[in-house]
Image (cartoon, coloured by chain):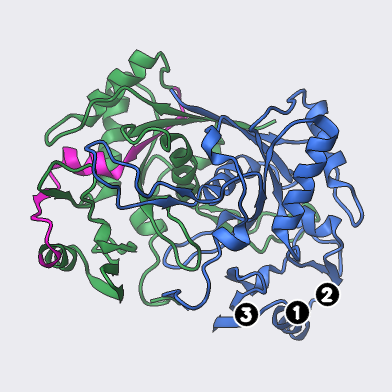
Chain colours: A green, B blue
Amino acid sequence: MSELRIVAVTGVDEIVDGDDLVTKFLDAVDAAGLGLEHHDVVTVTSKVVSKSEGRVVAFDGTREHRERLIAQESRRILRRRGDLRITETPHGFVNANAGIDHSNAPEGTAVLLPRDPDRSARRFRGEVRRRRGVDVGVVITDTFGRAWRHGVTDVALGCAGVRPIQDLRGTPDDRGRILDVTEVAVVDEIAAAVHLVLAKDAHTPFAVVRGLPAHFFGDGSVAHDVVRPTPGDLFR
Amino acid sequence: MSELRIVAVTGVDEIVDGDDLVTKFLDAVDAAGLGLEHHDVVTVTSKVVSKSEGRVVAFDGTREHRERLIAQESRRILRRRGDLRITETPHGFVNANAGIDHSNAPEGTAVLLPRDPDRSARRFRGEVRRRRGVDVGVVITDTFGRAWRHGVTDVALGCAGVRPIQDLRGTPDDRGRILDVTEVAVVDEIAAAVHLVLAKDAHTPFAVVRGLPAHFFGDGSVAHDVVRPTPGDLFR
C-alpha cells in the first residue's frame, strides 16, 4: 500500500520582517523530533514568506486604501462585485483582492504576496540542503477561491525541487491505450492536502509531507508550469 | 503535532456493473490489515461508482458519437475549443466533456458520471456502518481541470458524513479579529490529497484518510454545499 504522512510542524513563534524562516523551521522540526528525510516536501505558507521578506505595508483600513493597494498589486481586474475584486496578479495568479491579507497581520498593516514565490522556495530549499545535507522539495502555499465551486482551497504559489505537473501523457492505461487525463497539478494537490492539517491551528506555517513518489521530484516552477498564460485561457 | 495519514487501498479487482463496491472495499481493507476507525474518511473514485451503478454506455469512438454523449450529459456548454467542451453537468459541475471517460473503460464503451454522487456516498457509508459498526465519512472523487491554472486535480463529486465546507466565519484570528477567508472546501482538499497516493497505481479506487479533526464530520452534500449556482457565479 502507498501511504502518505502529512505532519503540521507546530510550536513556531510569530514570524516578523527579517526573520530567518529556515532557522525557525529547523528549530521547530528538531523540537518535534520529526527530522527531515530525502524526498520530504516542506510546505511554507506564503504569509510567513511575505512577512520574512518585508512584504508588509501600512494599511489604514479604509475602502479607498484597500482599492489602491489592490490596484497596485494587480496586473488586471477581471471581475468586481461589492468589495470583492477578482484580480490577475503580476505573477499571473488569479485570486481575490490580489491576495492582500489583513487578518493575522500586525495592527494597521496588510500583507502582500511574495514577489517571486518560486525564488523564495529555491532559497529555502538551498538553505535546508546547506545546513542539513538533505534534499527536500519546497512548496509555498496560499488560500485561493475557485470558479464554479464554493469555498477556498490551498494552492501552490511557488516551488523548488518538485515537478509541479506530473505529465502522464503517453502513459498507457490498464488496457494499453492512452489516458485522456494527462497532466496532474500535484503541487496544488500537495498544498490542498497540507491545508487539512493546518486547519486546526492558524499559527502553523510549516508542514512536512512524507511518502511522495520519487518521480514527483525534480526541476520546475509554479510560474512556468502551472500559471496559464492569459492568451489561450478560456476564462479571462 | 497534527498528523494525517493517507493510505491507498490496493489489491482491488476491476469493478464491473452490479459489483458490490462496499464488499470489494472491505475485503481489500481486511487483506491489507488496515482496519477502519471512527472518523476515518473513505474515498472512492467516481469511475468505479459509475461502473458499479451501470453508468457505462456503448461508444463507437467517433467524434459524432462523442458530441452526442456530451450533449446528452450536459445542461449547458460554456466554452468550446477543438474537441474540448467545457460543460455544466445536470449536477451543476463545471468540467471537461461532461466528465465522460473512455480510458480504463471496457472496449467500445464510455463511462458517465454517477447520477447522484451524494446518494452513492450515503449508501456506501450506510453499508459500512451496517456491516462494521464504524462511522466513516465517504467522499466520491473525480479529476477535473480548473480555470487559470494548468493541470487537473481531484475534487469531490459527492460526500456523506463529512461537512464539505468548514465555515471559519466568525472565528477570531490570533489577534482577536475576524478572518477574511472563511469557508474552506475541505472535501475538495481531501480529494486532492488522496489523488497524490493514487497516482502510483491507476487500479486503486479506494483510499482511507485518518486523522482529520472531529469537526470535519457531520451532515452535508457536495450538491448543496459546494456547487455554486449559476446565478451569482462570476465565471459562467
A76 relative position to A34: left or right: left
Distance between mark 1 and mark 2 Cα atoms: 9 Å
The answer to whether residue A50 is magenta is yes
Looking at this view, is A14 or A45 the one in front?
A14
Distance between mark 1 and mark 3 Cα atoms: 13 Å
> Where residue B117 appears, x then y in whole percent?
71, 58
The residue at the point 21 percent across, 37 percent down is B175
B173 relative position to B21: left or right: left
* Badge 1 vs badge 2, beta-carbon distance below 8 Å: yes
Residue under label 1: B69
The quadrant in which residue B53 appears is bottom right
Closer to us: mark 1 or mark 3? 1
> Where residue B182 appears, x then y in whole percent?
38, 51
Sort mark 3 into few (<14), some (14-19) or many (20+) by Cα contacts within 10 Å.
Answer: few
The residue at the point 20 percent across, 32 percent down is A15
B158 to B137, vertically: above or below: below
Looking at this view, is B204 or B134 the one in front?
B134
> Where residue B124 appears, x then y in whole percent?
78, 46
The residue at the point 34 percent across, 14 percent down is A31
Residue under label 3: B83
Mark closest to the chain's N terminus, 1 or 2: 2
Dot 2: element: loop
Magenta-drawn segment:
A37-64
A78 relative position to B60: left or right: left
Marks 2, 3 in one chain = yes
Residue under label 2: B59
The answer to whether residue B20 is magenta is no
B81 to A122, vertically: above or below: below
Looking at this view, is B152 or A74 the one in front?
A74
Sort mark 2 into few (<14), some (14-19) or many (20+) by Cα contacts within 10 Å.
Answer: some
Question: Quadrant of the image for the N terminus of chain A?
Answer: top right
Mark closest to the chain's N terminus, 1 or 3: 1
